[in-house]
Image (tube, helix red, strand yellow):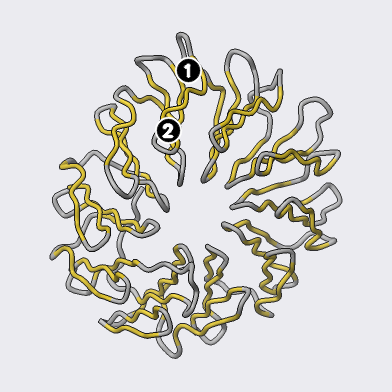
Amino acid sequence: MMRSIPALALLHVLAGNTNAQDVAAYVDYLDRFHVFDHGQFKQIEGQRPQAFQVGGDYVAYSSKNSDLRIYRNGQVTTLERTDAVEPTVTDHYLGYVIAGVLKVHDGEQLNTVCYNTGGHIVEDSVVAYFDERNQRLSAWYRGEEIVLEDALAQWPLENWKSGDNLIAYITTFEKKFKIFYDGDVWDVNFMVDADMPYQAGCDLVAFQDVVDLSFDAFYRGKFFDLEPVMPVRFEVGKGIMAYQDVNGALKVFEDGTIYTALDFPPQEWYVKDSLVVIKDQNFLKVFDEGKLHVVERFWPEVWEASWGAIGYVDQVRNVQLWRRSGRTTVTRGEPVQDIQLIRGLLVAYLNVRSVKVGWHGETYTH
């Protein structure tokens, strides 16, 4: 669901980061809706929208009169004139169902994917859906339909989970555990119970093998034996997974390699996109690309992480943005209510009537 809208925001992108977000959106103190797009401010609505969400290079929003609209490449397009749409917004795809019809905007055009849609999942580069008329489960991938399961008469899945570019599921009839990835369906396990533990992320699925009850992973078309027994807890992100083994050690599976981040249980830990964020001895630590980094020797009360970056409010209320390549101070001496980090773009909510945007080494004020 698209998020509600604060009154004012200060946005900052780490200078020089080629993967940084180039598009942002905000509502000013007069309730006007603006976008920041590649160094330019533009007002796109004179009234506060009901909700909005930023995708990879676009903004989707529900206007004051409930129209579903998308801003991309300098233009506003109305997709639907209705108040019954709750779209899924990803980096590349925007998808929604209206009157049973599943539609997906792929950045160039609006595609009608299915006319009689049951359950569905919209991810960054794959869409999965159940066609109730033809009784089959299909994936819409690279602009084509790929049939995954023929349901015959009823819902074909016990359950399913998804990552940016894959779908993992357990079938109802055959009791198989399968993974759809890169256009192919992999039969992973047979005689699987519906409660078999597994999680899906980008390029990665972690699961319990039903034969020897070991902890295994599917990563970019290959299978890995990780542990002889299931961990106490595991979380999957974008090409990375962290888990706490039976002895309490925190381990990270990244790029086909298992690392031990800590030999003992941390106070807290989280997987956020491609980062593992760790609270250890009240320090803020991050595991990224095979290394454990000490970001701060305190644990911030307010923080967000995405796209290889972590933003947080430090002990003197400055807003900081950390990446493996270095740290940037975003704000100094300004009151901060909250922060939000979207695809590496940091949003700090302030009690002021101006908007500042740091983009490609320059600061823009509106």
- Residue position marked by numbered label 2 in the rendering: 140
Q: Which residue does the image show at 21% across and 44% down from the upper left?
A: 79
What kind of element bears circle 2? strand
Total marks placed: 2
Q: Is residue 231 left or right of residue 140?
A: right
The x and y percentages for residue 76 are 19, 56
Decide if residue 274 is on the left or right side of residue 104. Answer: right
Q: CA distance from mark 1 to mark 2?
A: 18 Å
Residue drawn 64% across and 44% down? 204
Q: Are marks 1 and 2 in contact (CB under 8 Å)?
A: no
**What is the three-letter code of the residue carrying label 1?**
Trp
What residue is at 26 percent from the left and 61 percent from the top? 73
Q: Residue at x 31, y 22 (%)?
A: 116
Residue 71 percent coordinates (x, y): 25, 57
Percent coordinates x, y for residue 246 in the rendering: 84, 47
Q: Which residue is mark 1?
A: 155
Which is nearer the eye, 42 or 336? 42
Along the horizontal axis of the image, is 17 left or right of 112?
Answer: right
